[in-house]
Amino acid sequence: MLSLIHFYGYNILPFPNVNKFSPLKSKTRAFANNKSHIYLAKMEQERSMDISLKDLSKQLEDFAKVRNWEKYHSPRNLLLAMVGEVGELSEIFQWRGEVDKGLPNWEESDKEHLGEELSDVLLYLIRLADICGIDLAHAATKKILKNSIKYPEPKVFLRDEDSYN
């Protein structure tokens, strides 16, 4: 069975010579015989591969250039697209109430769908940061440091019960 790769809002098949549409979304496209497609198939095969935000940013830039989409990638358009994806992500949780950590009661297909929607949000966020000239990894690291100063670790004192008599 062919596994689909979800990338930048599209479901694509991981083999360049296969030209089929995925039924998962109306905006599905099959991208045959292009470098992005081959690279993504390799990524799918190496699930444990570590990738940096800079690597993702470069892939997104190349993806947009090849398709001549750069003219549409204004900060406003990317933000609105990301908000739309956050809406799709929200729909997954909408009627489930609280869910347990690790989603133990979810079907694998539901977890896969969640991963796709989380990825859409992440990819738009990375692209938006890149278009705005923000080094997202650096900004996130600075924000974690800032938060650690603003919200320091609680001080815990072990009490010797005898000393309070």
Image (cartoon, rainbow, N blue to C red):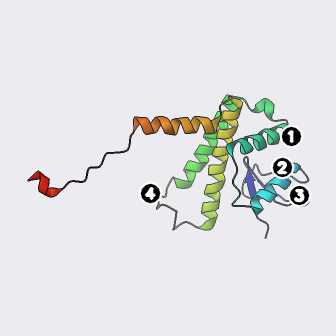
- Mark 1 or mark 3: whose residue is earlier in sequence: 3
Residue type (three-letter) at the residue carrying disc 1: Val
Report how far apart the C-alphas of labels 2 and 3 lie in the structure. 10 Å
- Mark 1 or mark 4: whose residue is earlier in sequence: 1
Residue at left 57%, top 38%? 140
Disc 1: which residue: 66
Label 1 secondary element? helix
In front of the other: 96 or 56: 56
**Marking on residue 36:** 2
Across and down, in percent, residue 36 comes to 84, 49
Q: Given contact means CB atoms under 8 Å apart, are the residues at marks 2 and 1 in contact?
A: yes
Across and down, in percent, residue 11 comes to 76, 54
In front of the other: 62 or 24: 62
Drawn side of residue 121 relative to residue 5, left or right? left
Q: Residues within 10 Å of mark 2 (few under 14, many from 20)?
A: some
Residue type (three-letter) at the residue carrying disc 4: Glu
Report how far apart the C-alphas of labels 3 and 4 lie in the structure. 41 Å
Disc 4: which residue: 98
Across and down, in percent, residue 160 comes to 18, 56
Report how far apart the C-alphas of labels 4 and 2 lie in the structure. 38 Å
Q: Is residue 4 visible?
A: no
